[in-house]
Image (spheres, grey):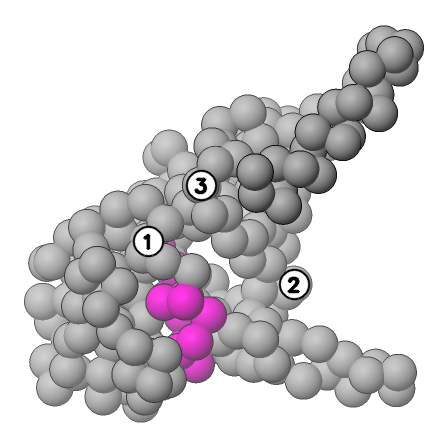
Amino acid sequence: MSSRDAILARIRSAITDAPEPAPIVRDYLPMHVRDDHLTLIDLLAENLTDYRARVHRSTEAELPAMLARLLAEHGSHSVALPTGLPPHWLDQATGVAQHHDADGELTARELDAVDSVVTGCRLAIAETGTLVLDAGPGQGRRALTLVPDHHICVVRTADQIVASLPHALPTLDPRRPLTWISGPSATSDIELDRVEGVHGPRVLDVVLLR
């Protein structure tokens, strides 16, 4: 028996005669804005900006030029790409070396040397300005979006924006490695001096794809 199994067995034994817990009353509002598609897009953009992410809007046809411009503005010479990302997205990023992280083959040292990473997401939460990645196609493993200095995340506004956390949780698989992103990585000390890039990307660009 493993240590984990032994601990769980002791917990089960300890609660054998415990009474059934009272039902949880969830009488809070599941959302605080009108459930209107355009309203949610604007609210997401507002909250992402408030977290100091840089928000852009693009159509599918404009996206390759948009990504090329964002990489150029950041001065990127290399970009990491997850498996499943549409290959034409980077068609116009000339002069930028593309490193494909197929099966997680890029080492931490190699990821640290990459200037940017481009991914999609699982969904975005409008009320909190949060992006959620679950390592699905086009998103990659967690290290891919935490090590490089610059993260470009593309959100499909047609089907990936939800109003609130209560709307998001039922659609997510808790068995998957979920990464929750609210703006670029940042922290502050007791004097409230903000430092960005401490435990993730220093720069976050979010493209709202319509």
**Residue 144 showing in the rendered view:** yes
Task: Give the mark nearer the N terminus: 2 vs 1.
Answer: 2
Q: Nearer the viewer, residue 121 or 105?
A: 105
Residue drawn at x 15%, y 82% is 97
Left or right: residue 205 compared with residue 94: right
Q: Which residue is mark 1?
A: 139
Q: Which residue is mark 2?
A: 50
Inspect the magenta stretch and tell me whether residue 153 lies in it. yes
Q: Which residues are magenta?
A: 143-155
The image's mark for residue 176 is 3
Label 2, residues with CA under 10 Å away: few <14, some 14-19, many ≥20: few
Determine which quarter of the picture holds residue 39: top right
Label 3, residues with CA under 10 Å away: few <14, some 14-19, many ≥20: few
Determine which quarter of the picture holds residue 154: bottom left
Q: Does 27 appear above or below 63?
A: above
Circle 3: residue type: Arg
Left or right: residue 56 compared with residue 128: left
Task: Give the mark nearer the N terminus: 1 vs 3.
Answer: 1
* 2 vs 1, front mark: 1
- Residue 44 in the image: x percent, y percent? 55, 48
Q: Secondary structure at mark 1?
A: loop
Residue drawn at x 50%, y 47% is 178
Task: Give the mark nearer the N terminus: 3 vs 2.
Answer: 2
Circle 1: residue type: Gln
Determine which quarter of the picture holds residue 56: bottom left
Q: Nearer the viewer, residue 74 or 165?
A: 165
Left or right: residue 154 compared with residue 179: left
- Residue 55 in the image: x percent, y percent? 47, 63
* 3 vs 2, front mark: 3
Quarter of the image where the N terminus is located: top right
